[in-house]
Amino acid sequence: MGGVRMDRHMLMRELGILVSAAKDRVTALQSVAEVLRSSGRYRWVGLYNVDRAAGTVTNIVWSGPGAPEYPAFPITKGLTGAAIFTRKTVNVGDVAADPRYLTAFGTTRSEIIVPVLDGASQNVVGTIDVESEKPNAFSEEVQTLLEACSKLIRPLWRPDFGTSVRCGHLT
């Protein structure tokens, strides 16, 4: 990812442990945000819920220097709205040149929004939002890695999280 980076296998292993050991969704997601942020030395990482019925995207947790400028916003807005609509990652190397960008931090130069899909891969239930002060911070390799992370952490968006048996443990 950018700068000194965590080994892909180490990152996936750490996220897998966080998901499988998770007892509290918000605590687990906070740890995920922090691991993702430190793995690429990014300035900011946020994890969001997507509520199609309400038409909103809501921040769950974030890791970085400040709270999100838009803790909740319409499902149709911003780069996140584009990722939700297409069910595909939106990777923008120069946010100043993209009219869909909702300015959160004036120093953000590039941003990637990775959708978290439901178990059937039909609907976006959440997003991973990573921001960098460096232009073009998210290579194809980084995008592929973040998409793999999204699949790995998907269980934290299951509607029955906290009430089902996984890996032989009641969570």
Image: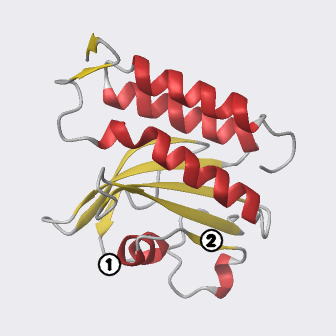
Q: Position of residue 147 (x, y in %)?
A: 56, 55
Q: Label 1 crowding class (10 Å Cα cut-off): few <14, some 14-19, many 20+?
A: some
Along the polypeptide, which appears first: circle 1 or circle 2?
Answer: 1
As measured in the structure, the alpha-carbon distance from the residue carrying label 1 to the one carrying label 2 is 17 Å
Q: Residue 118 carries which label?
A: none
User: Quick one: quadrant of the C terminus?
Assistant: top left
Residue type (three-letter) at the residue carrying disc 2: Asn
Q: Where is residue 119 in the image (x, y as percent from the top left)?
A: 30, 50
Q: Measuring 60% from the left and 51% from the top, which residue is drawn there?
A: 146
Q: Measuring 53% from the left and 77% from the top, which residue is drawn there?
A: 101
Q: Measuring 77% from the left and 62% from the top, which residue is drawn there?
A: 137
SS under mark 2: strand
Query: Disc 1 vs disc 2: which is toward the camera?
Result: 2
Depth order, front residue of 27/162: 162
Side of 123 where 140 appears, left or right: right
Residue marked by disc 2: 91
| Residue 138 showing in the rendered view | no
Whether 54 is drawn above or below 1: the answer is below
Side of 22 where 161 appears, left or right: left
| Residue 157 showing in the rendered view | yes
Q: Measuring 29% from the left and 11% from the top, which residue is drawn there?
A: 169
SS under mark 1: loop
Depth order, front residue of 71/35: 35
Depth order, front residue of 44/161: 161
Q: Label 2 crowding class (10 Å Cα cut-off): few <14, some 14-19, many 20+?
A: many
Residue type (three-letter) at the residue carrying disc 1: Thr
Q: Which mark is residue 76?
A: 1
Q: Position of residue 95 (x, y in %)?
A: 65, 77
